[in-house]
Structures are given as C-alpha cells and as structure tokens.
Image (tube, rainbow, N blue to C red):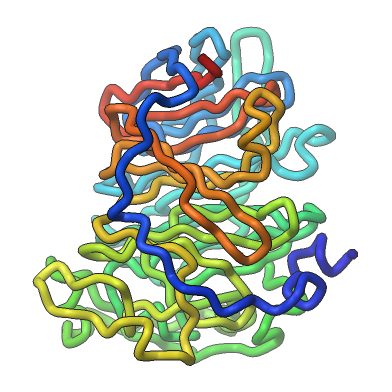
Amino acid sequence: MQLLKSGLIPWLLLGATPVIAQINAGTLAPTPSPPFKLTKVAQFDLPWRIAFLPDGRMLITEKIGKLFLATQSGQKLEVTGVPPVLYENQNGLLGVYLSPSYSSDGAIYLTYSEPGQERGTSSPALARATLKIGAGTASLEDLKVIWHDPIKGKGGQVGAAVAFSPDQKLLFLTAGDRQRFTPAQDPNQPAGKILRLTLDGKPAPGNPMEGKTGARSVPVIDPPRDTEAAKTAPVVRTYVFDGPNLTPSEIWSSGHRTPYGLAFAPDGRLWELEHGPRGGDELNLIEPGKNYGWPLVSYAVNYDGVPIASPDTRPDLAKPVIYWTPVLAPGNLMFYSGAMFPKWKGSAFATGLVSRALHRIEVHGAIATPAEHWTVGFRVRAVEQAPDGALWLIEDDREGGLYRLTPK
C-alpha cells in the first residue's frame, strides 16, 4: 500500500496497463442542457490557477505576475512578496499549490517563468514560500526557488503543473518543450518531461534513472515560428552546467509537448493532459520511464501542415488514452471528490480554451472515456473543487471571470 500511496509503482499493484483503442474525443458534440448553473463572482487579469485554502478562501494567480487571496463572495486582496516573472504569451506567474504541510506551516508552492539575465529569456521555476495572512494583509515570506531549469530561452510554453503523490511526500512537475522539438527526447534537458522530485525540489529516490548525471553542456535554440523548423534550427548558444547535471535523475517520463494538466486519480494512477500542435491534444496515463512520443509521433500535423507519424507506427512509444482532433486546448486537469455532484465522484475534469467548455471524463483504472462536455461561452483556463464540493472556473481573458458552478 505504501508503494501505491507514493505513486512509485501502482501499475504493479493494480495490474498492467491494458492495450485499449485510442479515442478521438475531438469530434464529439457538446452535451446539451448542463446540470449546473454558473455564477460570476469576481474578475481578474489573465488568471491562471486556483488553490483553495481549508476555510474556503482561494489563492488565484494572474499570469501578469500577481497573486490574490479571494473570498467566495468576490473580495480580493493582493498578496505581496511574489517573485519577479517574465510575462509573455503563455508564460508568467502560473501555478499555485498548497503544500501537503500547509495546515501546520502555511507553505505554498508557485510555478512561474523565471527571468534570465539576457532580455526576453526565461525558464520554468518552482518556489516554496510561507503564506502569512493578517488583518487586511497577505504576504509571502521566506520564498525560496527549490528547482528551476537553468537553461534559459525565449518563447514557447513552460508547462509547470504540479501534482503531489498520494502519500503527500513527493511532487511531480511538468516541463513543456517550449516548441523546440528535440529537448523532449533529450534526457540531458528538463524540457518536454515530467519530473518526480522531493518536496524540497531534489531528485526523488526510485526514479527510473536514479543517480545518473547528464551531459555537462547542451545546445540551446530559440523556437522558430513554425515548430517543425526546430528540427533544423541553428544552435543559438551552448549552455554549460555549473556543476553536475541532475536532469536524468529527475525524469519520470519523457516525450511531452505542452503538459498543462497533471492529477492523481483516486486509485493512485497519474494522468496528464497536454497540447498537441494542429490537433492531437492528449490525455496520457503516466508510468515511469515511458516515452510519450513527442515530437516523433502525434495524432496531428505540424503548424506548417507537415504530417507527423502516427503513434500507431511506433509500438515502442506510449499512446494517449484519449486524444482530441480538433483540439480542446486544455487548461488543467482535476479529479472530483465532492458530495455536491454525487454522480461525478471519481470523474476527471478538463478545461478547454478552444472548445470553450468543461469536459468530464469517466476514469476506471487505466481506462478513460469522454463522458460529456458543456460549452460555457468563454475560454476556460482552470477548474478546481472547493471544500464544499462546488466547482470553480476561471476565464482566460484580460477581464477573466471567476465563476462558481453549482447544481441547477
């Protein structure tokens, strides 16, 4: 049972992943007559993630670099002490997550684009801080960057979603490929990977390449306008690590493009949701050491129309359980455990930016099936569950709404 809780080898305890047909959910029609109502509570500037405190208040990040403490009635208080971020396109201040020890020490985690010394460069970073809430004040104290990709670059998406292991002793962190193609298959670079770390940001014991160090230098490119061109893009510079390159010992899985959703199912299995290029968004069941294929295969084409080999041609690479062509453009992923919607208990929920919808997915062991999705009329960046079982959505917009979702 301890192995299951740690997220180390649940597939051994629960049975090997069955070979199942991939489902294209992108062609499914929206579900009419949603069984819920949406109530707009507040408004934010490009909100990205929600984290609920035990008392029902929430922390909400704005991509532009602000963090707010908000009540369920819509009152907002800006939190001071937020680290500097590089805000551009899909990067900036991204995730906020309560530490497993929050109730005793007030610790939270932030993910964001950490600015580099060269103008316009950044890389994903993971920081831990203590949230202090007073009378009319809220601040972050003792903020410490516990992990970052030292390889700074321009553009692309950094991913930066976090999920804690079921036993709350480890964390999993996604890193996007930043539209560079090749790093997703390079064990010397974090880009295009899911990392498994201790709560202090160190390589976790039991990782597939535990104890292995990588190359002391790696080539760096800036993403061309068309990602297909990254295969032959010139090297802008060579990055040399100051010390041992620990990247291989951090890696849990590889071959990911833009992984924005990461969540554990109630049975301890880890699921991941990522953007494809033109088509081919994916829901993947994550297992250690597996290669999920990007950019070698995809149920999609590149932005310039160049076809990509189908996952069906590479049995050595892990296939998605569900894919979307056309895309939903996922925002995040979560599993519902509340009582307000009892029929949804155990379901996964994914948000859609392009689909402008909330997607419910039924998950039973290693099998996931698209159940229904409801259009809500705006780009849905994130969904989270409040302590009372209500779902809350945030809108991806400069005047992005915060919405409470409750039964009709």
Q: Which residue lies furthest to the right in this view?
A: 1
* Residue in the foreground of this view, choosing between 269 and 176: 269
88 lies left or right of 402:
left
2 lies left or right of 245:
right
- Rendered position, 202 above or below 255: above
Q: Which residue appears at 57% of the width and 14% of the height?
A: 71
Q: Residue furthest left?
A: 304
- The quadrant holding residue 17 is bottom right
157 lies left or right of 384:
left
- The quadrant holding residue 56 is top right
> Could you tell me which quadrant the N terminus lies in?
bottom right
Picture mark count: 0
- Rendered position, 316 above or below 123: below
- Rendered position, 5 above or below 105: below
Q: Which residue appears at 84% of the width and 69% of the height?
A: 3
Q: Which residue appears at 64% of the width and 89% of the height?
A: 212
* Residue in the foreground of this view, choosing between 84 and 258: 258
**Residue 307 coordinates in the image, percent (x, y):** 17, 79
* Residue in the foreground of this view, choosing between 12 and 371: 371
Q: Can residue 38 be seen in this view?
A: yes
- The quadrant holding residue 226 is bottom left
Q: Which residue appears at 40% of the width and 39% of the height?
A: 373
Q: Can residue 64 be seen in this view?
A: no
**Residue 15 coordinates in the image, percent (x, y):** 75, 75
**Residue 164 coordinates in the image, percent (x, y):** 69, 53
- Rendered position, 292 above or below 110: below
**Residue 150 coordinates in the image, percent (x, y):** 46, 69
